[in-house]
Image: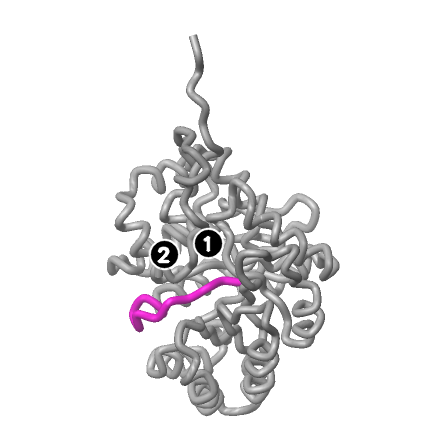
Amino acid sequence: MSIPATLPPAIPPAFRALVDDAAVFPPGEAPLPVAVAAHADHLRSAHRDLVGPFVIGAAALPEVARLATADLYPDAPLRVSVVVPAPSALPDVVGAVRAADRLELAGLEVKLVVGTPYAAQVTEVAHAVGDLPGVLTYVEVPRPGDPGWPEVADAVAAHGLRLKLRTGGVSADLFPTEWEVATWISGAAARRTPFKCTAGLHHAVRHTAAGTGFEHHGYLNVLLAAVRAGEGAGADAVEAALGERDAAALAAEVATTPPDRLVRARAAFASYGSCSVTEPYDDLAALGLLTPVPARPASARPAPVRPEEIR
């Protein structure tokens, strides 16, 4: 008796383009040539539909443009999301990407300068990206304990931009509490403003890292928090989703949440940057959130999903 062949497990719509490839950032810090080549491999892999753009700092753009050869990226330019150190640097960054024929600008992630009025900086960002249709522009916001947080969130919403939430880093103090992340997510939902996360979300479920003792948030926790916040749940319910450490319970809630509700939540929780792409995929597989699909001829297989298709 023959056994039907199967393709590798498919990426459900709720997880497509979820993980932006930030391999060159801490703690991974992959060398740039290695990371650019590895990203090309990700786009040809079984987990390709999970992968968003390649995240890179503005200073590395010339080297990335040199490395993104037609041999590595024969079908399309390398899609990049660029971390910009200040609003004033935006014109140079945009110009550098436009001048590189092997790069496509997918996103901008703009840091604000401490000590300069936040709202004015957000306005500067909005003016600088006004003629860039299709480019997702994120503004990194202060933590909720900073009195500037509501000001930034209001300005980002008013200009139709997006929020970037820093959910970890290289020291314990850079990991916000469950209350802080819940405040961010609820604030984004109230303003109908999409957000992305950066740092610390390598795994699906909230946990204490064995090597460092850092308290890591989980990307499934953030997704379910976005579901609850988007549907008007109170602060306690949103915070509870972020605090859940039982992997089986978390996976069961995801599995039993109607797909359309998860996809709506992904319109809010657009993506997150991770120095590993394979770890998030392995977690989904281990939690039973991927489903094998029947094999099809190569000509019938879908092209990789682009982020704008679900946002």
Identified at 37% across, 50% down, the residue is: 224
Q: Is mark 1 on a helix, strand or loop?
A: loop
Q: What stretch is highlighted in magenta?
A: 188-198
Could you tell me how far apart the alpha carbons at marks 2 and 1 are, in whole angstroms?
8 Å
In the image, residue 109 sits, relative to residue 243, either above or below, namely below
Residue located beneath label 2 in the image? 266
Q: Is mark 2 on a helix, strand or loop?
A: helix
Kindly indicate the quadrant of the structure image that contains residue 156.
bottom left
- Quadrant (top left/top right/bottom left/bottom right) for the C terminus: bottom left
Question: Which residue type does callout 1 highlight?
Answer: Leu
Horizontal and vertical percent position of residue 291: 40, 33
In the image, residue 188 sits, relative to residue 242, either above or below, namely below
Left or right: 172 as drawn, with respect to 184: right
Question: Which residue type does callout 2 highlight?
Answer: Arg
Identified at 58% across, 61% down, the residue is: 54
| Image mark for residue 18 | 1
Q: Which residue lies furthest to the front in this view?
A: 299
Circle 2/circle 1 CB separation < 8 Å: yes
Horizontal and vertical percent position of residue 24: 67, 61
| Image mark for residue 118 | none
- Quadrant (top left/top right/bottom left/bottom right) for the N terminus: top left
